[in-house]
Image (cartoon, rainbow, N blue to C red):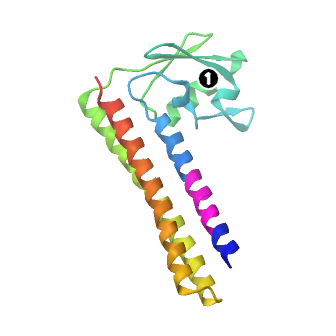
Amino acid sequence: MSEEVELIKSETEVSMKKAIDHFETELVKIRAGKASPAMLDGIVVDYYGSPTPIGQVGNIVTLDARTLSIQPWEKNMLQPIERAIIAANIGINPQNDGVNIRLFLPPLTEERRKELVKRTAGEGEDSKIAVRNIRRDSIEQIKKLQKDGLSEDASKEAETSIQDITNKFISLIDKHLQAKEKEIMAV
């Protein structure tokens, strides 16, 4: 029985780690005034009929703190890349010069910063919900084991252990949120 409990605990930790990794990926996409090629992650371009990540149809470089440049590997991909960026609604209008596409990030206003902080908090809340759902599923598995013969003490101990793992990941999410909020609000 204890092997099954340990397996449940390790699966819980792995699943929660995946939720944190996803959260970190989403945070990178929220810009904090500095241009980053990661801002374009998740944008897909129609590449001869198949949706392809933008990083696989061109070279994305940061020219300076507020400018990104995309150099497509094929000239005929300029229009599809431009359309994909506009469709992604990331708040930046692409500038097409016939060779490259440049993205100029406007300076963040106070209102926009607060909006980004709200969006960041929303992502954090989604991640906390995911972590809590993982906790709930794990505790349900422990209760099933208790019905199958696991002692009540061992069951309570396992639930406490799962709660400790949950608390660790929730506090990690809070730390990420505080750091991102500080980064966004820095002028």
What residue sits 27% from the left and 26% below the top? Answer: 109
The quadrant of the rendering that contains the N terminus is: bottom right
Q: Quadrant of residue 72?
A: top right
Q: Residue at x 47, y 63 (%)?
A: 164
Front position in the image: 39 or 13: 13
- SS for dot 1: helix
Relative to 171, is 6 on the left or the right?
A: right
85 relative to 150, above or below: above
Q: Residue 88 at what x, y percent from top left?
A: 51, 36
Q: Farthest left residue?
A: 110
Which residue carries the number 1 mark? 79
| Residue 16 covered by magenta stretch | yes
Q: Which residues are magenta?
A: 8-18
Amino acid residing under circle 1: Gln
Decide which of 13, 72 is in the foreground and name it: 13
- Image quadrant where residue 118 sits: top left
Give the residue furthest to the front: 153
Q: Is residue 95 magenta?
A: no
Q: Position of residue 104 (x, y in %)?
A: 44, 17
Place residue 30 in its image quadrant. Answer: top left
Q: Is residue 23 above or below residue 113?
A: below
